[in-house]
Image (tube, grey):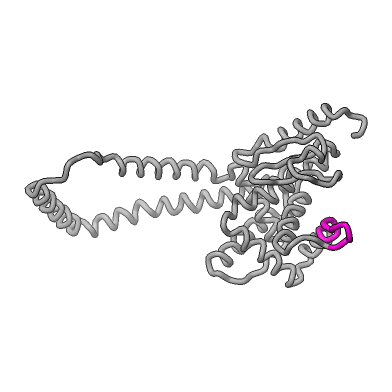
Amino acid sequence: MHSLSPASRTHRAAAIVNWLTSRWKSGPVVRIAPTARHLPFPAPDDARGLHWNGTVHLVANQAPDSLAQTLAHEAVGHYGLRAMLGKEWPHFMRHIQLGLQAGDPGLRTLQRHIRAAYVDEAGRFCLSPRQEADEIAAYAAEELLCLQSGRIRPGRPLAQAIEAWKGRALREGLLLERGVSRQELEGALLLAAQRMEGGPLGPVRRWIGRRQMRSATIALMRDLNKPPMSLEESERLLKAEEDRLHRKGETKGFLAGIGLIVSFPLLLACIGIMIWGLISLFAR
C-alpha cells in the first residue's frame, strides 16, 4: 500500500467505491480524501472515514479491504439506518443500549471493540450512550460485509430480516420497551442495505407512488379564479347530490360485493409480493 503514489491510491479507492455503490439506487454522496488530514474535520492520522450530513468521506490511504469495510461502516451503519428508520432512529439506538443492559452476548462483543477504540488521550472511553450504540451498529455493518460480493450478508438473512421487522413493530407499533439483540441489529442493517439498493419491493413502491401523485394532481385540477356560484346553480347542485346519494344507497350492497371480489385478488397479490421479497432477501 505504501509504495503507491497518492494519486494511485485515490484512483484505486475510487474504483472500489464505484464497485460497491454500483447497485445503489439511493445512498449517500461518497467523497474520497487522500489522507486523514484532508477530511473536512480534524481527525487523527489513523482515521479511515466519517459520515456527516448525508455525505460519506473515505480516506484513500488504507488497504482495499479496510476501505470497503469503512464504506459499509459509514454508508450502511450510519447513513443507511438513519435513512430507513427516520424519526425512529433515536429509539432504536436507545433500545440497543437496552439490549446491552440485558446482556446480549453479540452486542457485548461489539461493545468491547468500540470501548477499546474510542478513548481520549487519558485512555477514557469518550462516547455518549447514543454515540456508542451508533458506533456499535456501524461496526456490525463492517463485519457483515461480504468482500467477494460487496453486499451485506448476515448468517441467516431471512430469519434476521423477519426479526428486525417484528422488533420494529413491537417497539414503534405497540410501544414496548424491548431491547435490540445482535440478530435483530444485523437484520436491520440488511434491510437498510436493501433499501439503498432499491429493495425487492422498490418497483412496487414507485408504482404506488406514481398513482398517488396522479390522483392528487387530478384532484387539484380546478379553476381557483372561478367566481362564486349563483343561488340557482347551488340549488341545482344540491338536488343532483341528493339524487346521487339516493342511487348510492340503492347500490351499496352490490358495490360492497364487487369490492370484496376485487380486493381479494389484490390481497393475494400483496401477500405474494411480500413472499417474493423475503425469498429475494434470502437468495442473495
Residue at 64% across / 52% down in the picture?
81
In this picture, which residue range is highlighted in magenta? 114-124
List x then y, in percent, for residue 127: 76, 60
- Above or below, 57 relative to 155: above
The magenta stretch spans residue 115: yes
Q: Give the dominant element type of the magenta stretch: helix, strand or loop.
A: loop
Q: Is residue 153 left or right of residue 262?
A: right
Residue at 60% across / 40% down in the picture?
26
Residue at 77% across / 53% down in the picture?
139
Quadrant in the picture for the N terminus: top right
Quarter of the rendering containing residue 196: top right
Decide if residue 157 is in sight here.
Answer: yes
Residue at 14% across / 46% down in the picture?
229
Quadrant in the picture for the C terminus: top right
List x then y, in percent, for residue 186: 70, 56
Decide if residue 148 is in sight here.
Answer: no
List x then y, in percent, for residue 48: 81, 44
List x then y, in percent, for residue 275: 56, 52
Q: Is residue 46 left or right of residue 197?
A: right
